[in-house]
Image (cartoon, rainbow, N blue to C red):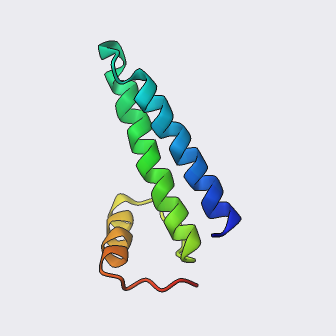
């Protein structure tokens, strides 16, 4: 695995750990949602880096990339 992909996954795991630690606190629901979203976003960036896919910022482009990955149309660079 590429180093940059590993770094994105480590950052994603950190967000997931934070969400897991605060999930029981009902006053922090918004922060659980935020860290969960960040985990997903960083995981997607890790996959995109690993497969040499240009990073995109628009939501529709991210959805397209996810669909292509799911359909196995993406080949590792």
Above/below status of 9 relative to 56: above
Choose top left, top right, bottom left or bottom right for residue 34: top left
Query: Which x, y percent locates residue 65?
Result: 38, 72
- As drawn, the residue found furthest toward the right would be 3
From the image, which quarter does the N terminus lie in? Answer: bottom right
Query: Which x, y percent locates residue 16?
Result: 46, 39
Q: Please give left or right for residue 60 compared with residue 57 in the image.
A: left
Residue at 37% in and 75% down: 69
Above/below status of 45 relative to 31: below
Choose top left, top right, bottom left or bottom right for residue 21: top left
Query: Which x, y percent locates residue 57?
Result: 47, 59
Query: Which x, y percent locates residue 30?
Result: 34, 25
Above/below status of 31 relative to 61: above
Residue at 50% in and 38% down: 15
From the image, which quarter does the C terminus lie in? Answer: bottom right
Residue at 67% in and 62% down: 4
Above/below status of 11 relative to 24: below
Total tally of numbered discs in the picture: 0
Instruction: Say which of 24 and 44 sits in front.
Output: 24
């Amino acid at each position: 695995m590429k180093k940059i992909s590993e770094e994105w996954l480590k950052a994603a795991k950190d967000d997931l750990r934070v969400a897991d630690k605060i999930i029981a606190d009902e006053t922090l629901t918004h922060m659980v949602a935020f860290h969960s979203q960040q985990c997903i976003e960083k995981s997607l960036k890790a996959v995109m880096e690993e497969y040499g896919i240009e990073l995109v910022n628009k939501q529709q482009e991210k959805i397209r990339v996810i669909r292509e990955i799911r359909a196995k149309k993406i080949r590792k660079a």
